[in-house]
Structure formats: structure tokens, C-alpha cells
Image (cartoon, helix red, strand yellow):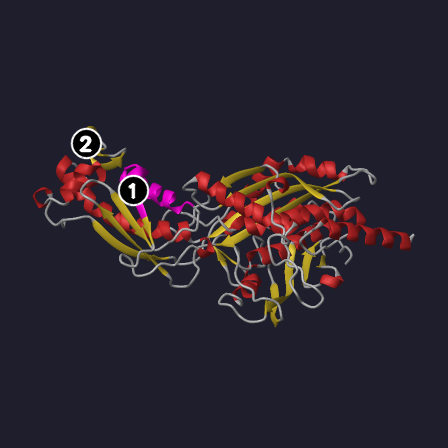
Amino acid sequence: MGRSAPGKSARFSWPRSHRGGEAAAQNDGTLLGIRVHIVADLGAYFLLSTPTVPVSTSHRLTGPYTTPAMCVEVHGVVTNKPPTGAYRGAGGPEAAFCMERTIDLIAQDLNLDPAEVRRKNLIPPDAFPYCTPTGITYDSGQYEQALDRALDLSDYAAWRSRSRQQQPTQEPRIGVGLATVVKGTGARTPNLAEHARLIIESSGRVLLHLGISPHGQGSETTFAQIVADELGVTPADVQVLHGDTDDLPAGGGTSGSRGLIAGSSVAHVVLQKARQNLVPIATHLLDCRPEDVVFQDGRVYDRHHPERDVPFSRIAAAAYDESQLPPGVERGLDFSGSHTLPASPYAFAAHVAVVEVSPETGAIRLLNYVAVHDAGRIVNPLLAAGQVQGSVVQGIGQALLEGMVYSPEGQPLTGTLSDYVVPRAAHIPELTLDTLETLSPLTPLGVKGIGELPTLAAPAAVANAVMDALSPWGIRHIDTPLTPVKIWQALQEADQRSLAVS
């Protein structure tokens, strides 16, 4: 590869045995272009989402960077392995891993700080909406601010200084890894409409029917919060029901981190319809102007005369009593509606991982992990943190532990969980998590998805940290999972090369 002259550009490639990508960059780390050749093992036959992942990978390769030019070639190969399909991120983790390792190689070869190379190439806030060379449009973001927050929370400068000051014989070796990634969320299928129905009973109890069906994300709690905030009741007054075809014509599910995005958007539609009926009733009972009606703490009152109030249940009861209705307001409170996302909101993450690697055994231990996410408005911080924690752990497992192994005859050797290693509590350090809120203009509440986002950043951040620890040996690439035996073998080969040269 070699360094370029000042102001010139240089070309960076992966090691020849793993060549699939090349990058052109100026001497200061500014990206000029990326060329990637993807060879996708599709397995023996197609599932519904099999071709989606490699194609999605090709579109997402630019990540959060201003890349002037891209050339991406995708080849799908049919093999005798099991078929492949979408799995939490669906092309995002593959794209992020490729780009984030490339950024680190650029920084390494130019003797630059990986954080500064990222900062130099991140899309600035005033560039949104930003269209990538692969045809994706990012809606909003404050990428540099999120990166700075992650660097600060992780004490990045101190860890990196410590790793650089280690003596050659000092063990174990410390490595620091970064990943800055984006993830499109919400618009799983073009023109996919989400449906909802809102019923307010005469008692004041609220029923929200949604096509979104949860898979353990705690969606009922989040949607109940949204309804309660809009109507001024408590979440306990709201019941959320999912996936009932007696009430709704269809539902799109939660794939693509679309649960909150699609669900909150269509909930907003029916809630606005409800308020259009409730406000005239309130003005009629309170004798005030529509713009002065406030729904709060289970009451409805005049903002200029707070003492002039009625319980929310009184408004609900009046809606079913024609004698109390103002002219032009129909009896009852039953509202249906639909919403179609115009495009995918794009969320951002900045992760920092610190590891120590034993050259003697190849064992890896995570010392510190920080993750900052910008997923637009955070409706429920506790549930968001739970999504992030599980996603980070999954990413750590992909980087260090999880991998299918086949015999020379093609038989899978990791067919059960007794052979296929997944993360346990002992593998995971305490996670430091934070959020930044850059609202999306594509959703009524400004929300973006968060559930899949960490799975893009975590494998790359951990791999970058491990490779940083191994950089004194000239090791540039090891296929994941980065198991102790692979680390040990790579170190032995590096020592043998060193002896041969000397």
C-alpha cells in the first residue's frame, strides 16, 4: 500500500487472502472512493429473504461517511450449506463490519487516530437530507456529537494512550476499537400501510388496536404511554391490543425496527382524530376556546382558568350522550386510520470497546464498553436500554464466539447449543449507555428505530479493538469469530514470519 505524498491520495486494500474491498483516501484520511466485491454464500436454495441481505449490504456500505464515489459488485453463490435469510440487521452488520475495518486500516497505515479519521469523514448536520452514492437518503443526524459523547464517556484518549505506551513484552495487550454506524429503520416494504383503531369507552377507558405485534420489546407499555400523553390519562387507563383481524385489515409486524416507528405513527393518526371530537365536547362543557383546552392528569380544563375543569371520564361519557353533544359532533368515540411511512428514518450509533488479549493463550477479555445511540425521540428510556443491551451482547457474541463450523465432508459440527457458543454473563462487561435525540422529519413523533442498530456497531467495535491489540505483530485480519485458538495461531504465524525475516 504505501503512503501518499502530502495532498495526494493512497489506495488501501484488505490482505490479499481476504481481498474484497479497496479504499482511496487522501493523506489526511479523507475518503475519496470505495470499491467492494461481495461474494455471498446463499446456501442450497432461496428463502424469502435470502437475496435481500447481500443486496442490502451493497446499499449500506457507505455507512455514516461522505464517500464521493462507490463501486459495488455483488455475486450470489449457491452452495450445499443451509439457506440463509435476514437476521437482525439484514445486511447492516455485514456492511458496517466491512467499512469500519477499512476505516481502521486507513488510520493504521497513515498513522492517524481512528477517531479522527471517522470525524473527518462523518456527514455534517447541515448536509441532511443526505443521499449516498448507493442511492440511500439519510433523513437527519448529529453524528459528530454522538461520537464525541462516546469518546468522552469511554475515556478513549486515556485508553488509547495506555495501549500505545505498552512495552513490547508487556502482557496482556490492550486494544481500543471504534465503530460509527447508521441503520435504516421502519420502512420494511414500500407502500406498506399500518392500521390502528382507537376506542374510548364512556367510562374513560381507552382501547388501542394495532397491527403491530410485539416480540418481547415491551411495545404495549410504549404505546400506552403515547396514548396517555396525548389524552392526559395514565397508562393504566389504556389497553393495547395487537393483531386482531376482526378490528384491523392488516399489520406489518416488527421487522426492520419498525415497531415503534410504524406503530407510533399510526397511533398518532387515530389520536388526532380522537382529539378532533374530544375538544369540541370539552369546549361545550367548559365554555372555553378550542385552543385553550388542556388534557392532563386525568382532567380536562381551560388553560386560562385551571379551576374550570372536568374529569376525562366526564368528557368520554358526554360523547355517548346526545343531549350533551355540541352541534356537528357525532355520538361515540371510535376512530380508525392508517399511515404509510414515506421513507426509512436512519438512526446512528457510536461504540467504543476496550479489550485485553493474552498473546500466550489468545484469550480476550472486554474491559470497557460504551455505546451512544441517536434514535430520534426516546419514548421509554428503560425499554430502549433493554433493546440496546441485548443487541450489544448479540454483537459481542458474533465477534468473539458465534460461528458455524463444518467438517471437510460438509457436515455441520455446531448444530446444537451444546456446540454453538453464545454469550454468557461472564463474557460481558458493564455497559455504559447514552442516547442523543435528533428527531426524524419522517415520523410524527420524530422517532427512529433502535433495536437492530447496536448489532451493526458491536461486532465491528470489538473486532477493531482486538485487531488494535494485535497490530504490533503486523496482524491485519482474522475471520470472526475471534476465538482464542485463531488469535494464538495468528500470533504464532506472525512470530514465524518475524524469525524468517531476521
Judged from the image, the secondary structure of the residue bearing numbered disc 2 is strand
Q: Which of the pair 38/203 is nearer the observer? A: 203
Q: Position of residue 25 (x, y in %)?
A: 68, 56
Report the side of 42 relative to 242 (left or right).
Answer: right
Quick check: can you spot residue 116?
no
* Residue for badge 2: 309
Magenta range is 218-240
Instruction: Specify the amino acid type for callout 2.
Output: Asp
Report the side of 134 relative to 163 (left or right).
Answer: left
* Residue for badge 1: 238
Instruction: Specify the amino acid type for callout 1.
Output: Val
Toward which corner of the image does residue 319 lie, by quadrant?
Answer: top left
Judged from the image, the secondary structure of the residue bearing numbered disc 1 is strand
Q: Answer above or below: position of 278 versus 189.
A: above
Q: Answer above or below: position of 141 versus 92.
A: above
Residue furthest to the top in view is: 307
The residue sitting at 38% across, 59% down in the picture is 252
> In terms of secondary structure, what is the magenta stretch mainly?
helix
